[in-house]
Amino acid sequence: MTQNAGKGFGTGEKSIINVMHDPENNSNRDTFSSAKVFFHVDMDAFYASVEQSDNPEYRGKPVIIGASPGKRGVVSACSYEARKFGIHSAMPISQAYARCRNGIYLPVRMKRYQEISRQIMEIFDDFTPEVLQISIDEAFLNMTGTEKLFGSPTEAAEKIKLTIKEKTNLNTSIGIAHNKFLAKLASDHDKPDGLYEVQKGYEIDFLNSIKLGDLWGLGKKTLILLENINITTVQELRAVKLRDLKHITGNSSGEFLFNIVRGVDPGIYSGKIKKPSVSNEITFEEDTENSELIKLTILELAHKIFFRILESGEKGRTVQLKLRFTDFTTVTIRETLEYSVNSGEELYKLAVKLLEKKWDGLTAVRLIGLGLSSLESNKTPDQIELFPNTYDQARKVEQVVLDIKKRGSKLTKASLLKHTRDDS
Amino acid sequence: MKFTCHKNVILKEISIAQDIISSRNSLSILSNVLLEAEDGTLKIKATDLKVSFETQIPVDVSQAGSTTVFCDKLLGILRSLPEGDVEFNLTNDRLLINPVFGKINFQLKSIGSEKFPEIKEIEDDKYFELPQQSFIDMISQTIFSVSDDETRYFMNGVYLEHQEGSLSMVATDGRRLSFIKKELHNEINDFEAVIIPTKILHLLKKLSSGEGNLYLAVSEKNIFVKFDNQKISSNLIEGQFPNYSRVIPEHQEFNIVVSKKDLIEALRRVSLLVEQKSRRIYLTFATGTITLNSEESEIGVAKEEISCDYEGDGLTVALNYLYLLEPLKVIEEEEITIKFTESNKAISIISVPEKDYFHIVMPMQLD
């Protein structure tokens, strides 16, 4: 395990790294001069800002995007003005409405956001060849070695922010650091319209300023686990020995936590990190016992998930289905296969089998979630099949579809067409 | 209903009945065993609606009748009783179980036998005869290759096919395949090829004495087997079995003859350090030797060389070691031939001298 350390370890820190590296040692600092520079660019309240930019009359007002009030559903995004009312994404729309009756409630216009998103990504391409888009409104830019072209990292970031503002009228927050993990945390630091650089040598100070729950990759369950043993700050977490961390949270989580509190990138968005699962869920606008609709929804989820799986170059063996019924009782059922799921089509069939085990066909269903876990890299040894595998062929077709989609075209499985909603 | 018989005679049959009964359906008629006493015979029936079992044992009947009781408890009671004769007496919907000697009294509540599901039957003239041992051999050579992946349900059973004067069985999980064909001298009633679930086959293997003949009948949806005093039937798996004949290599480039025992022992040793998820082991064939080795891992590495009869260039294949070990365990001969062409093509495992069966294994990616 390599540790990037520098001056500025928290006072009184007694970690292994301090022993390995003298924080004041210049030669150690030198190792950073060749260090990489990553930007994490994050659009501020992206959907809402696009709406406000397209409709000047919405500016300065609480804009809430998602389901319309009175209907079932959740907030997809909201403007900073709306956040002042305590509204946040994933909040049930009824709650949002209770908090802010005068808000502007808008439907999701995914196509428009995607259009703007593409414009922004094109801007990035002018600054570096290495752009890693991680969602509609976020990307990592590898800006290593661009000083001669755009000046210091801060200067380059200013230029990017300005260009985006000029071309789209949107605000951006950029975090700069020598690894992606820190850059992502840094972009949140001065949000909105922020720009923050984690200086070499000051990683630990920066991390100490962050709330434990805001650390990327630290989930609620882990947080509770840590709180139970009175660990509530990054400093306190850093003081725990690796061995003990592994004991408390499990081997891989322990190592993950040990790394991140030291500013070591655990490998986010580089395929190195083992994500536990890929999943997705949909709440029906109205509870339904229509088995066609339920299966179509599963089909849609299966394809969404599988495209994500293909994109990350992984494969998974555990299929899990979550059902929430009209009375809010929630069941999950999972099945682990001996081999990995080969295609969205196969994932769908497996999910329908699970559905048949847990659903009586009569009770109205409120929400469906589908997930694929036990993920591993696609490169693990593969058993050659005796018979030409139909699912193998399906996987190849889906890979081609994915490639086409990546180039910007929209392709949808025919049976999903009538069911396709604006957000797909 | 009232009858008396020796504890051990009925215990054996009730324990088979319990094997068939689905343990999940506790306290329904399906967890009960049917007892029917008449003319000096006790008929015992059990079913999970897919597999059904019926047997007859001689008992001393003093009053004819029938009933059903919770099989699991009946088995427990019988196991616990001392050696000797036991009297069974149905009064007021309770089956009283009293050893003839001793003051033990069990009462099991019963459900009327009219509630018991009807067990499918087939006309006697549909049955044909074949040696028990032949059929058991066929099961043994194939059953381990069946897939337990429910999404490939059509591979969850053994494929039974009738050709002119012979029966063949095939099993595959899509990565390996086992095949056996028995020439039969009796006349066989023709039937369409079927996929038989493993439960009945395991049961046949367990119950068959291997002596004498058994009687087999195949209908569109069921298979029926009679032997000794027992009748077993099962539903069939509906679906299309893969076109297996297409994947049987017609010609393979290289032949390697090796001692089965040497190979099994080497596999057992080297597999200790094989990564247990992929079970990938490497075999390198060179003139006079096979080298088996595991991948280098955090734990370590294993390597073993055994001698064989082969002349040719070094060639390495990777495969799931269980796919090699399982056929070796059922091959009776002392030597085997491994046939192969390339590292990504099917490998055949054949006994020396060649018998009426063979096994095919697909290798794994080399790296």
Image: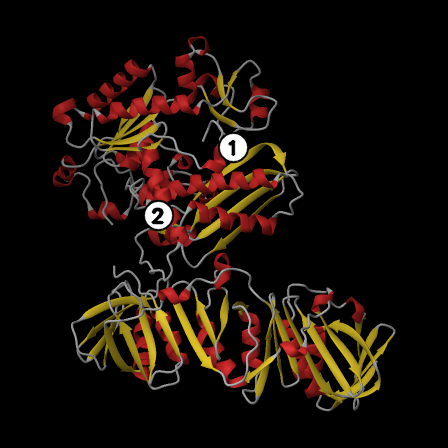
> Label 1 is found on which chain of the structure?
A
Which residue corresponds to mark 2?
A314
Query: Residue A25, located in which quarter of the rendered image?
Result: top left
Q: Is residue B86 visible?
A: no
> Label 2 is found on which chain of the structure?
A
Q: Describe the element under mark 2 as helix, strand or loop.
A: strand
Q: Earlier in the sequence, mark 1 or mark 2?
A: 2
Task: Please name the residue shown 60% across and 66% down the image.
Answer: B220
Q: Are marks 1 and 2 in contact (CB under 8 Å)?
A: no
Q: Nearer the viewer, residue B260 or A395?
A: A395
Q: Describe the element under mark 1 as helix, strand or loop.
A: helix
Return the mark for residue B129. Answer: none
Where is the C terminus of chain A found, in terms of image quarters? top left
Q: Nearer the viewer, residue B187 or B183?
A: B187
**Percent of width and height locating residue A279:** 45, 42
B278 to the left or right of A417:
left
> Badge 2: how crowded within 10 Å, few (<14), some, or many (20+)?
many
Farthest right residue in view: B92
Q: Is residue B328 visible?
A: yes
Farthest top residue in view: A57
Kind of residue at disc 1: His
**Percent of width and height locating residue B281:** 29, 68
**Percent of width and height locating residue B46:** 69, 73
Q: CA distance from mark 1 to mark 2?
A: 28 Å
Q: Nearer the viewer, residue A125 or A234?
A: A125
| Residue B235 higher or lower than B85, as above or below | above
Task: Please name the residue shown 42% across and 73% down the image.
Answer: B179
| Residue A88 higher or lower than B233, as above or below | above
Kind of residue at disc 2: Glu
Q: How is the image coloured?
A: secondary structure
**Percent of width and height locating residue B45:** 71, 75
Which residue corresponds to mark 1?
A419
